[in-house]
């Protein structure tokens, strides 16, 4: 419990620092948002009136506290690009798309990585192991946006498994919505699955040399059964730590993949806000993405302590010494 509270406290401090740095970064960027919103033909009086309306005439600490209070209450401000629409409505409309894209990508990552690692360790340095090593090396080295382009070219234009640039609304047809996200999620999942499979493969080889594995084999357990029943469970413990990194990679990859496949999620909204210098939207999305990554890593750290309390005992012993 103490460790969980300490990790939650560290996550809150980190998120607070991210909000401060992001607010300061967008506050010192050259250019006046009021002038940008009104255009170069606006008069000085119009610019000053909009500055007062946007609170730009107040000091930086007062503006930050007002922005933070609004952020915590759900009032993220208004977009300059989307005709003054509330940022909270823009995010809430696109958040389910990115959420299901990330969730499907994580599921595909596990579905690909775990069987691939089990397949490769059946015979060390054998044909299957070498083939799996080549596949993981290729998967790690290929960028996800290039995979997205290949999927569009092969499965979209060539085989016509899906319609390029067509998105199904989840509120109209949820099954069709998931189908439209399959290839974008697969493009994100392949590099992550290759990285996880390589890490899990090394952990499985290490677990095979343990006394408990040899004992299970001496009692008559077949190699595949002992591998799945005993070695895999212990090998997954250090792999949980990598899942926090994969969550971050999934969200960062979705920013590009949503643009490649024309998926109307948070990533595409972020790109549109960057190209139009819509700083309030960019700032809100940066903090939101940081929040998701920080929460994911915090949950992973807590899960590690629950799964294997020895890690916590080791840390306490090292501090005591």
Image (cartoon, rainbow, N blue to C red):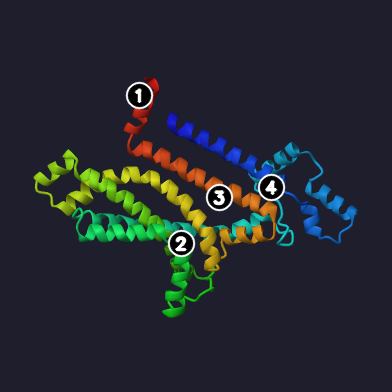
Q: Does the residue at mark 4 contact the one at mark 3 (Cβ under 8 Å)?
A: no
Q: Give the image location of residue 45, x and y in percent.
A: 90, 53
Q: Earlier in the sequence, mark 1 or mark 3?
A: 3
Foreground residue among 145 and 216: 145
Residue at image x 72%, y 45%? Answer: 27
Asked if residue 244 is positioned above or below residue 115 in the image, the reply reads: above
87 lies left or right of 142:
right
Q: Earlier in the sequence, mark 1 or mark 4?
A: 4
Sort mark 2 into few (<14), some (14-19) or many (20+) by Cα contacts within 10 Å: many
Q: Earlier in the sequence, mark 4 or mark 3?
A: 4
Residue at image x 78%, y 38%? Answer: 59
Residue at image x 75%, y 38%? Answer: 62
Sort mark 4 into few (<14), some (14-19) or many (20+) by Cα contacts within 10 Å: few
Dot 1: what SS? helix
- Please give the residue where the numbered disc 1 appears in the rendered image: 317
- Please give the residue where the numbered disc 4 appears in the rendered image: 26
Residue at image x 55%, y 45%? Answer: 291
Asked if residue 162 is positioned above or below residue 307 in the image, the reply reads: below
* The label number, if any, that marks residue 144 in the structure image: 2
Dot 2: what SS? helix
Q: Is residue 107 visible?
A: no
The label nearer to you, 1 versus 2, is: 2
Asked if residue 76 is positioned above or below residue 15 in the image, the reply reads: below
Q: Give the image location of residue 248, x and y in percent.
A: 48, 50
- Please give the residue where the numbered disc 3 appears in the rendered image: 289
57 lies left or right of 99:
right
* The N terminus sits in image quarter: top left
Q: CA distance from mark 1 to mark 3?
A: 35 Å
* The label number, if any, that marks residue 113 in the structure image: none
């Amino acid at each position: 419990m103490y460790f969980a509270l300490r990790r939650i406290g560290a996550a809150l401090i980190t998120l607070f620092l991210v909000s401060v740095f992001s607010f300061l970064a967008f506050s010192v960027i050259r250019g006046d948002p009021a002038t940008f919103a009104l255009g170069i033909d606006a008069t000085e009086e119009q610019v000053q009136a909009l500055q007062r309306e946007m609170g730009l005439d107040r000091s930086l600490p007062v503006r930050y506290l007002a922005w933070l209070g609004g952020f915590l209450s759900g009032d993220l401000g208004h977009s300059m690009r989307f005709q003054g629409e509330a940022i909270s409505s823009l995010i809430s409309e696109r958040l389910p798309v990115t959420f299901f894209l990330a969730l499907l990508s994580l599921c595909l990552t596990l579905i690909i990585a775990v069987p691939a690692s089990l397949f490769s360790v059946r015979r060390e340095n054998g044909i299957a192991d070498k083939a799996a090593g080549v596949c993981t090396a290729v998967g790690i080295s290929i960028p996800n946006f290039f995979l997205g382009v290949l999927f569009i070219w092969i499965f979209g234009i060539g085989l016509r498994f899906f319609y390029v640039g067509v998105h199904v609304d989840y509120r109209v047809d949820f099954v069709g919505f998931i189908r439209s996200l399959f290839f974008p999620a697969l493009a994100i999942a392949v590099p992550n699955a290759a990285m996880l499979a390589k890490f899990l493969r090394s952990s499985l080889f290490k677990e095979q040399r343990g006394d408990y594995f040899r004992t299970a084999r001496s009692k008559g357990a077949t190699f595949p059964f002992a591998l799945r029943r005993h070695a895999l469970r212990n090998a997954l413990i250090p792999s949980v730590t990598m899942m926090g990194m994969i969550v971050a990679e999934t969200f960062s990859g979705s920013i590009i993949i949503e643009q490649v496949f024309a998926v109307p999620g948070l990533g595409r909204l972020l790109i549109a806000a960057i190209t139009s210098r819509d700083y309030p939207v960019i700032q809100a999305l940066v903090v939101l993405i940081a929040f998701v990554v920080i929460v994911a890593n915090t949950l992973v750290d807590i899960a590690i302590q629950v799964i294997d309390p020895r890690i916590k005992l080791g840390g306490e012993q090292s501090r005591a010494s």
